[in-house]
Image (cartoon, rainbow, N blue to C red):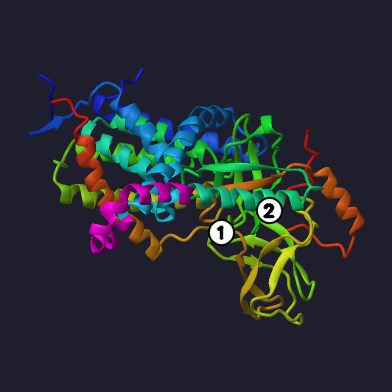
Amino acid sequence: MVAIPSRHKSLVLLAGVIVLQVLMLAVQIKRDSEGRLIRVWTVGAVSPFERAGSYGFGWIRDIWRHYFALQNTTKESEQIRRENDALKLQITQLQGKAAEADRLAALLNFRQSQASVPMIGARVIGTGAGTASLTIQLDRGERDGIRKNMGVITPDGVVGKVVEAYPNASQVLLLTDKESGVGAMLADSRVQGPVGGLGEPLLVMKYVPNDDTVNLGERVITSGMDRIFPRDLPVGTVSEIKPGNQFKQIRVKPAANLERLEEVLVLLSLRSLEMKNEENTGDPQPPPPGAPNPPRAAKR
Amino acid sequence: MNEAFDIRGESHIEVHKFRTGAIIIATLLALVIQASFPIHFAKTAVLDLPLLVTIYFGLSRRNPSTGLLLGMVVGLLQDSLSGPKVPLGLYGIAKTIIGYLASSIGARLDTEHPAARFALTATFFVAHQGLIVLTRRILLSQPEPWFSMHLVGAALANALVAVFLFLLLDRLRKN
């Protein structure tokens, strides 16, 4: 048996570890279906810390915004501020609470206006740990009725879809990710075409023929054809139009602020949406690239 | 005596030891911050704290086997937290190699000076991104650009943060 020189042991270990991970990658590519157990364990173990971290950072951010960031201003009125310090601090705290209450009230109003569509509010507690995919993590999961492929929205518009549901948390693929997609149409001309992400802040609307008229600033809404989102939800507004070889190159600014999400709504019932689509059967449209197969109805 | 000395060739390079649990706690903290911070401060998404921690402990411990194993664990945890669209092993492979390189270089050079740390971190960051692009192109058939100005900016930002972060992590060393 050939002995490995000690100075080469680490090199052999490196090669072994790399080969092992490459094999692991290969296995995943072959069986790209359900989530892996290591993901469930890792997310289960880390999500409580993320949750705590999220609240902690929120507290630090509020202190920063409401105290330190105002230092220059307060120097000019230091005398007055001394007299009113306690009162201002109290007001600041109340303003923070009021802002949160406003956001939650907006969510509640939207929720009540869409009473026929079952949905659940969730707080964003984390983002993807790398830049390879654009995901966020929610503080609610399977135990709250959330399932894979459910749509996620805010009152402003479409956010993305659930790509993994864990017992107490879930991961959402944002609309701006390269593999995201939603069935959409132009609000005025009713021209349909899938909208997807590019890994950038702007989205792209595909397969709109050069002959169709599209206006800058025109609203883009969901078509309901992907069987994930109901019709007429805001997706974004047209921000750039260029003629292409056969189809226009249309860039869309998302309606929801995807870079600053704090609370979102998850559309729980897929069955009722399917029924809506059946009622509103229009021109057939191919599903957008990256769109999932029609999901199963959620258990409630 | 808390310091161990390792003789490689003719040079005497100090191998640093850390307080009990320091590496595990610092690694987990880096992962949690990486996942939580960008919600509140979107610009911080350019930072790769798990990579910085891998580089730091690789440079300090100066043991290639430990460095590559730490890189592998950190990378796989980061893969697991990056959603199902990121296959397990993407960051794992990149950070394994970076952990190995950092500890190998740390065993040959004195990497305590802030300027050396800045330069090494920037280089390792670019190499890390290059390995990810390479893995994507070869193993996953996903075309990705090799170079962008964003990469340069991100490398410099990470290197700058590393200088201060490493000073903080130095405090975890045993005296």
Magenta-drawn segment: A69-96
Q: Nearer the viewer, residue A76 or B9?
A: A76
Q: Residue B96 lies in what quarter of the image? A: top left
Q: Residue at x 76, y 82 (%)?
A: A211
Q: Is residue A209 magenta?
A: no
Q: Are marks 2 and 1 on the same chain?
A: yes
Query: What is the chain identity of the residue bearing mark 1?
Result: A
Secondary structure mostly seen in magenta is helix
What's under tag 2, amino acid-wise?
A: Gly
- Give the SS element for disc 2: loop
Residue position for label 1: A257
Q: Nearer the viewer, residue A275 or B61?
A: A275
Does residue A78 sit above or below B17 in this rendering? below
Quadrant where the image shows the C terminus of chain A: top right
Give the label on residue A285, or none.
Answer: none
Q: Can you see residue A68?
A: yes
The disc, 2 or 1, on the residue closer to the chain's N-terminal end is 1
Q: Which residue is mark 2?
A: A290
